[in-house]
C-alpha cells in the first residue's frame, strides 16, 4: 500500500503533491479516514475503496485514493485499464486524427509549391500503429497501478448490497466487499430505433476506429463532436463523406460564428451535409446500406458502403444494479453533490454517469475529489468552466459562456474577436481561416467565456479556461507578454481588441475617434 509522506509544513513551497488541493493532512488521517466516515460497514471489508470503471475518472480516483493511504481495488470490464477513452475512444481517435491532419497538410502544401505523391494507406500498418499508442498508455496505467499497490480486477461489476459487489468475467464470478465505492462506469453509444441493423457495415464509434476498410461512401448519422471527428478521419483517408444531423445545425452547442470557418471547409470537402434531416430507415443490400431520409434537402433514399451511427451517448447507470445499493437514478444518471457523493453517504460517482458534460477532463477532476473526500479531506468539484473541444480540422473549442447560452439565460456580455487572417503565424501556416473570441462581463470586465476555431484550438482554449477560473480581465490577458509569432498571442490580441489597444488590427473607436 502506498503511504503518504509524514507531516510537512503547510506552505506552498514545501506542499506534498500527494495531499489534496484544499488542505494538507498527515498520513494517519488518511489511513483512518474510512473508519471515521462510514457507520454500519461490515466488520471486515476487502478494501477501503472499490472503484468501478478504469477510465480517466476511475483510474484517477483509484490512484489518488491509494496515494492517500487507502486500500483500493479497481474494477474494469475491459482486459486493460483506461476504459472507453484510452481503449476505444479519445486516444485512438486522436491518433487517427493526427494522421488525417498530416495527410491534409501534405495535400495543402501544393499551394506553397511542395507537391507530394498521393499517399498510399496501408491499413494494417496504420491500425497496428494506432493500437500501439493505446497499448503504451494502458500498459503505463497497469505499471502505475502496481507501484501504488492498487489491486485490479477484470469483469462486470454490479452491486449486490450497499457494501458488496459481484464481479462477473469469463471464468465466473467473485464477490468484493468495501467500505466506500466510487462509480465511474461511464457511458455507451446510443443506437436509435431503426438504426440497430445487424450488419457489420453499420458501425458505432468503436467499430469505426477498427478501420476494417476505407469505404468509398460513408454516411455519418449525427453532426455532433464524435460524428464530425470520425468524418474528419475518413475524409482524410479517402472516403466520400455525407453527414446527416437532426438539428438545424451541426455541433449545436458552439456559436455559429465560431463554426463558420469549420463548416465552410467541410462543405467544400464532404459529399453532402444535411441538417434538419431525419433518417427514417436502413436496409442491408448486397451493394451497401440503403438509407431513407426525411428532410428538405436530402434525397428520399441513397446507398452507402458503410454507415456510422454517432447519435450521442447514454450513461451506464442501468448496468451497475444501483438499486441494490439503495441508489437513485435519473434517466440512467446518478445524481451527486459537489463532493461527488450520491444519496448513499459512502458511495460516490464520477464522470459520464453523473451527467453532462460527458468529458474525460471533467471526470479526472471529479475522481480526485471523490478520493479526497473519502480520505477525510476538504475538497469539492467547483469548476467555473469546463472546456469542450472538437478535434476536427480545423479544431473547434469553447469554454464558459457562449453567446448563445448567454442570450438564452438573459446574461449581458461584451464580445471581442481577433481574426487569424491578421496573425503572422496563421498566415505562415496557410491556416488563416481561424478566429479567437472572448466574452466579458460588462460590469466587472472579467472574462466569462471564449471560443477558438483553428489549428490547435484545443490547446489554446486552456488559456481562456484559466482566465475564467482566475477572474482575469482584458488587461490581465493583454498585458501578459505572449511569444511572437504564435497562435497563443491571438488570445492576447482578442483582449487588446476589447481594450481598444490593439495595433495588429484597425478598429474604429466606439466614440467615433479613429484609433489603431
Image: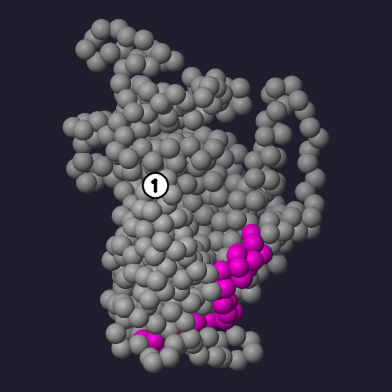
At a point 37% along the width and 49% down the height, the residue shown is 11
- Of the pair 161 and 111, the residue shown nearer to us: 161
Q: Is residue 290 left or right of residue 25?
A: right
Dividing the picture into quadrants, the one containing residue 28 is bottom left
Reply above or below: 464 against 77: above
Q: Give the extent of the magenta segment.
A: 137-165
Image position, residue 155 (x, y; %): 57, 81
Q: Is residue 229 left or right of residue 500?
A: right
Reply above or below: 197 against 360: below
**297 magenta-colored:** no
Identify the colour scheme used: one colour
At a point 60% along the width and 56% down the height, the residue shown is 91
Residue 397 visible in the shown view: yes
Badge count: 1
Dividing the picture into quadrants, the one containing residue 350 is bottom left
Q: Which residue is mark 1?
A: 12
**145 magenta-colored:** yes
Image position, residue 38 (x, y; %): 31, 81
Image position, residue 282 (x, y; %): 55, 66
Amino acid at each position: 500500500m502506498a503511504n503518504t509522506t509524514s507531516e510537512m509544513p503547510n506552505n506552498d513551497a514545501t506542499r506534498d503533491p500527494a495531499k489534496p488541493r484544499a488542505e494538507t493532512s498527515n498520513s494517519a488521517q488518511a489511513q483512518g479516514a474510512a473508519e471515521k466516515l462510514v457507520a454500519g460497514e461490515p466488520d471486515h471489508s476487502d478494501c477501503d475503496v472499490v472503484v468501478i470503471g478504469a477510465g480517466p475518472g476511475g483510474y484517477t480516483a483509484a490512484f489518488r485514493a491509494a496515494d492517500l493511504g487507502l486500500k483500493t481495488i479497481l474494477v474494469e470490464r475491459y482486459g486493460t485499464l483506461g476504459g472507453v477513452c484510452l481503449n476505444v475512444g479519445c486516444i485512438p481517435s486522436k491518433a487517427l486524427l493526427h494522421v488525417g491532419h498530416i495527410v491534409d497538410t501534405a495535400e495543402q502544401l501544393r499551394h506553397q509549391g511542395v507537391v507530394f505523391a498521393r499517399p498510399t494507406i496501408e491499413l494494417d500498418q496504420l491500425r497496428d500503429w494506432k493500437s500501439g499508442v493505446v497499448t503504451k498508455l494502458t500498459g503505463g496505467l497497469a505499471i502505475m497501478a502496481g507501484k501504488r499497490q492498487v489491486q485490479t480486477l477484470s469483469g462486470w461489476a454490479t452491486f449486490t448490497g450497499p457494501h458488496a459487489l459481484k464481479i462477473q468475467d469469463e471464468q465466473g464470478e467473485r464477490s468484493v466487499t468495501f467500505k466506500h465505492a466510487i462509480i465511474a462506469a461511464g457511458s455507451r453509444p446510443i443506437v436509435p430505433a431503426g438504426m440497430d441493423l445487424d450488419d457489420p457495415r453499420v458501425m458505432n464509434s468503436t467499430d469505426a476506429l477498427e478501420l476494417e476498410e476505407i469505404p468509398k461512401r460513408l454516411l455519418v448519422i449525427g453532426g455532433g463532436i464524435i460524428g464530425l471527428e470520425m468524418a474528419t478521419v475518413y475524409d482524410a483517408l479517402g472516403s466520400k463523406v455525407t453527414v446527416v444531423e437532426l438539428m438545424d445545425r451541426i455541433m449545436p452547442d458552439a456559436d455559429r460564428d465560431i463554426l463558420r470557418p469549420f463548416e465552410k471547409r467541410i462543405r467544400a470537402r464532404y459529399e453532402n451535409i444535411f441538417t434538419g434531416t431525419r433518417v427514417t430507415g436502413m436496409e442491408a443490400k448486397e451493394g451497401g446500406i440503403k438509407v431513407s431520409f426525411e428532410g428538405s434537402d436530402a434525397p428520399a433514399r441513397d446507398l452507402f458502403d458503410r454507415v456510422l451511427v454517432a447519435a450521442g451517448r447514454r450513461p451506464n447507470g442501468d448496468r451497475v444494479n444501483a438499486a441494490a445499493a439503495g441508489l437513485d437514478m435519473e434517466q440512467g444518471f446518478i445524481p451527486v453533490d459537489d463532493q461527488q457523493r450520491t444519496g448513499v453517504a459512502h458511495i460516490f460517482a464520477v464522470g459520464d454517469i453523473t451527467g453532462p458534460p460527458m468529458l474525460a477532463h471533467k471526470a479526472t477532476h471529479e475522481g480526485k475529489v471523490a478520493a479526497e473526500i473519502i480520505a477525510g479531506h476538504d475538497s469539492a468539484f467547483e469548476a467555473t468552466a469546463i472546456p469542450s473541444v472538437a478535434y476536427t480540422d480545423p479544431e473547434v473549442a469553447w469554454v464558459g459562456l457562449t453567446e448563445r447560452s448567454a442570450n438564452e439565460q438573459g446574461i449581458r456580455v461584451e464580445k471581442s474577436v481577433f481574426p487569424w487572417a491578421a496573425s503572422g503565424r496563421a498566415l505562415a501556416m496557410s491556416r488563416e481561416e481561424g478566429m479567437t473570441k472572448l466574452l466579458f462581463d460588462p460590469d466587472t470586465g472579467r472574462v466569462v467565456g471564449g471560443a477558438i476555431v483553428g489549428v490547435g484550438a484545443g490547446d489554446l482554449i486552456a488559456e481562456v479556461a484559466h482566465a475564467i477560473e482566475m477572474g482575469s480581465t482584458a488587461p490581465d490577458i493583454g498585458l501578459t507578454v505572449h511569444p511572437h509569432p504564435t497562435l497563443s498571442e491571438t488570445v492576447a490580441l482578442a483582449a487588446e481588441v476589447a481594450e481598444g489597444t490593439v495595433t495588429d488590427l484597425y478598429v474604429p473607436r466606439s466614440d467615433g475617434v479613429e484609433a489603431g
